[in-house]
Image: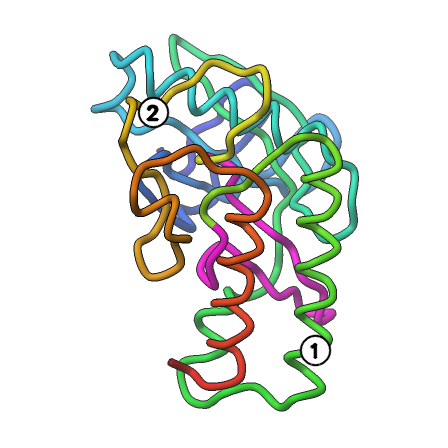
Amino acid sequence: MIGETILHYKIVKKIGEGGMGVVYKAQDTKLDRIVALKFLPKHLTAGETERARFLQEARAASALNHPNVCVVHDIMEHEGYEFIVMEYIDGVTLRKKLQDAPLKLKDAVHYAVQIGDALQAAHDKGIVHRDVKTENIMITSANQVKVMDFGLAKLKGALKLTKPSSTVGTLAYMSPEQIRGEETDNRSDIFSFGVVVYEMLTCK
């Protein structure tokens, strides 16, 4: 897809891939800005559950207007492919920042406050992230936190996309109730947030 133009977005390069989507850096030729496009992987396009979860991510994130949450600009479709147009973030993941050594206390506190603010904004709108981890937290070149990837978010009133007793999230960060496949709420995010803070201070 590199070099192709989809609608008015020119694909520049692939910048990431996860279980729920492939992300590309792109040039918005209409508004002359750099954005990120997240596409559902080709092998998942036939699955209605995955498509519904993909769109749920966009709805959850677009409901949030907060400086520490990645901005969702639009949801679009092209030749049967749905994709999310998101803010392009110039930075690195918190996981990458922790590769060599724990953070200094003042930096850990600085990031923790911003992560907490982002989660509070989500919880105030009934959104549970369900996969808070250092890989889903970006640190911009201006040292600002951006919480990413609401692909596993559980939006109150949305279609329940996980089977009974199934687990959604990343094991090392999961709350006990998530591991047991039980109902989760904002307290599950707080547990995962605590794990992130511990990791920032210890690299463990």
Query: Eyeballing the image, is 42 above or below 179?
Result: above
Residue nearer the viewer, 189 or 144: 189
Residue tagged 1:
109
**In the rendering, at what x and y percent does residue 183 appear?**
43, 33
In the rendered image, residue 38 lying in the magenta stretch gets the answer no
Q: How busy is the neighbourhood of tag 2: few (under 14 within 10 Å), some, or many (20 plus)?
A: some
**In the rendering, at what x and y percent does residue 71 appear?**
69, 39
Query: Eyeballing the image, is 151 above or below 146?
Result: above
Tell me if 59 is positioned left or right of 78 in this view: right
Residue tagged 2:
162
Where are the magenta residues, as a range? 132-151
Q: Residue at x 46, y 86 (%)?
A: 202
Tell me if 149 is positioned left or right of 41 in this view: right
Q: How busy is the neighbourhood of tag 1: few (under 14 within 10 Å), some, or many (20 plus)?
A: some
Amino acid type, callout 1? Val
- Quadrant position of residue 96: bottom left
